[in-house]
Amino acid sequence: MAEVNKADSLETEERSQLVRRGSLHWVHWLVVFLSIILTVGAWYIASEQVAQKNQEKFQRQAEQVIGLVEERMHLYENALWGGVAFLDANRGKTNYSQWLIYASSLDLDQVYPGINGIGVIYNIKPAQLEDYLAEERKLRPDYGLHPAHKEKEYWPITYIEPSKNNAKAVGLDMAFENNRYSAIQKARDTGKAQITGPIVLVQDAKKTPGFLFYTPFYKEGKKPETIDDRRADIVGVTYAPFIMSKLMLGTLASENRQVRIKISDNETLLYADDDQGANAANPRDDNPLFVKNVGVEMYGRTWLFNIESGLSFREDPSNDQPSWILIGGLVIDSMLLALFVFLTRVNRKALAYADKMTAALRDESQRLIKTNHDLEQFAYVASHDLKAPLNSINQVVSWIEEDCRDLLPEKSKEHIGMVKGRCQRMMTLLKDLLDYSKVGRFEYSSEPVSLRQISNDILVLHGKDQKFSCEVPDITINIPRVPLDIVLRNLISNSIKHHDKENGIIKIIYEERDHGHFIRVEDDGPGIPDDMHSKALEMFQTLQPRDKVEGSGMGLAMVKKIVEHHKGTFQLEENRERGTCYIIFWPFE
Amino acid sequence: MKADTSEVTLLLVEDDDIDAASIERSFLKQRIGNSIIRAHDGVEAFELLKGGAVPYPFMVLLDLQMPRMNGLEFLDKLRADPELDDTLVFVLTTSKSDQDIVESYNKKVAGYFVKEEAGINFIDVVNMFESYWRVLHVPTEPRTL
């Protein structure tokens, strides 16, 4: 039982280590926690980068849109100044057919997409009106001004090409309406290109926002320096009407933009991307990522560009990168956690299995210990209890021998002798068996023992000290006396009993090494053949018939049991020509 | 005054017939004329004593391991009995156990012998009785209460 308990305490330490590995350690949590931090960090940085990149992209696209609009307006301005140059070259004069030729040579549809037409507006004072009308009616008999107004001058659209789309505009007097009139006055007064505020073109059946673009020209191609000179010398303006939606379609249609724009002039909406027009591929984002409002000076007006990112901006695949990083990272983290949980569960299972096996082994070893104990107990009780009836048999037989000495035939007396002999042998057997089962029942502590003294005592006790001698070193060793005595007695007695000659020498050689006693007991008897050595150490084995040499066959088995009980070894030396040599290793306590 | 100790009766309490026979045989062999009365266990021995079947003076040679009532139980009963509590008892048993020896002397036995050390046919114990009785003095009459 003590063995089992010792094994238990050894096991406890290793077991507690396994138990620790059976649950998630703080290191596991730290690793998981750090990897989550890492994931979130990577996600945050990537998001920041994407946000910054998007911000830059939006800025770039917004500037690009504004730049495109400005560039296009500049192109139109140039076209109008071209018209001015043409008129200047003609001293401010032209007629319907000349303008038709000029305008058609501009190839408006191809070169100036988005422009609705290009025309000439003359400034007519009331005194000149009759002459003007007469002049124009030469080529266009039904030409007339409309609508009527109360201003003291007229700014009628005289020519506009292509005339097909602009028929309603011909003869329209710009002074009838403030937007048109104030812008044209401004153009006259500044000498620069100007646009009107938002208006609805008369030729636009859809009534969508538009504006007019004016460039003034003066008498004899002059460019007067002062407002007064300009007012005095003004002849008219070249002009172009724009329908805003068409303009934007022409300007921005080819661009694959991800921003949506709204242009307004003084809070009147000029243009807004809708889902059919120039920006159909980029639907509106109800909650735009970026919004920008820029006021742009545009030929005397301020156009407010309201630019916001559209849905396609949001749906840009590169925007999803941070999300993928986050999702991927979290998946890896959870797999890591799952791995840890799995590993600890495997450990727990292994531990449970080991526990089960240990318990089974412990049960088994306790059962074995008990069985062994029971066997020894049985051997003890059996040999003890067998002795009494055996004694009785022996006694009764000797009574018969005594009482019937004169009556029994010689043969029967011989038989009685055999019965007594067998009884004696059985007695010895039982005694040795009893001794064998007693080995280990008592523990003896080491004491100084004189090797020569103990050996000689055994020899004397055996009664053969005259014929056998014992060579033994005169030393004192520290060893349990009683077990050593039993061992030496059995060995010496064996040597004498099995000797094939009358006289013999028994040699005992002692050496102290490897923390133990080495004792060799040699005799010069017949020896035991090598192949019988293991058999010789078994219980109840005799190498000669019992009738020849009396012996229980327990002697060497007992020696082996005693030596092994003291954690030593007992063996027979091999390859000997003659004699037996027993080698005992008996470790110190 | 020396009583005739050849009249001392031995009450032999022994369950084993051969052991009992051994003692009887040794008595005969040593020509000891004292009578032996045999009981097989404590119960029978006590009945014999109480029933007056054992004439005065007497001693008891007691085995310990017996059926029905063992030796130690018999001693208890004997020492508790006012008529018999002074009885001389010797123990002859197979037991070498210290516990049995100590308990026996606690119950005032006069001697404790182990069977296997008592010689062939218990001759040593028988010789001891012979010498003992030769020089022994006992009261001529039993105690009167």
Image (cartoon, coloured by chain):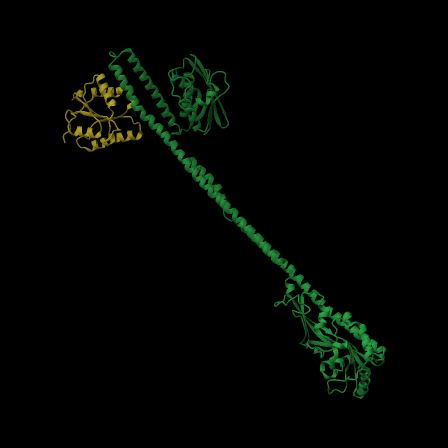
Chain colours: A green, B yellow
Query: Looking at the image, can residue A351 be seen?
Result: yes
Q: Residue A417 occupies which quadrant of the picture? A: top left
Is B87 left, or right, of A533 in this rendering?
left
Is B84 left, or right, of A141 in this rendering?
left
Q: Position of residue A193 (x, y in %)?
A: 77, 76
Q: Residue A428 occupies which quadrant of the picture? A: top left
Q: Position of residue B111 (x, y in %)?
A: 25, 26
Observer-nearest of A126 and B26: A126
Q: Residue A326 occupies which quadrant of the picture? A: bottom right
Observer-nearest of A68 and B30: A68
Q: Position of residue A198 (x, y in %)?
A: 70, 77
- What is the total number of numbered labels drawn onto the structure image? 0
Residue at image location 37% in from the left, 25% down from the top: A435
Q: Position of residue A345 (x, y in %)?
A: 50, 47
Is B23 left, or right, of A314 in this rendering?
left
Observer-nearest of B61 and A165: A165
Query: Looking at the image, can residue A213 be seen?
Result: no
Task: Specify the quadrant that holds the N terminus of chain B.
Answer: top left
Task: Specify the quadrant that holds the C terminus of chain B.
Answer: top left
Q: Is residue A121 above or below residue A483?
A: below
Is A288 left, or right, of A497 in this rendering?
right
Q: Is residue B57 above or below residue A22?
A: above
Residue at image location 17% in from the left, 32% down from the top: B82
Q: Is residue A514 above or below residue A244?
A: above
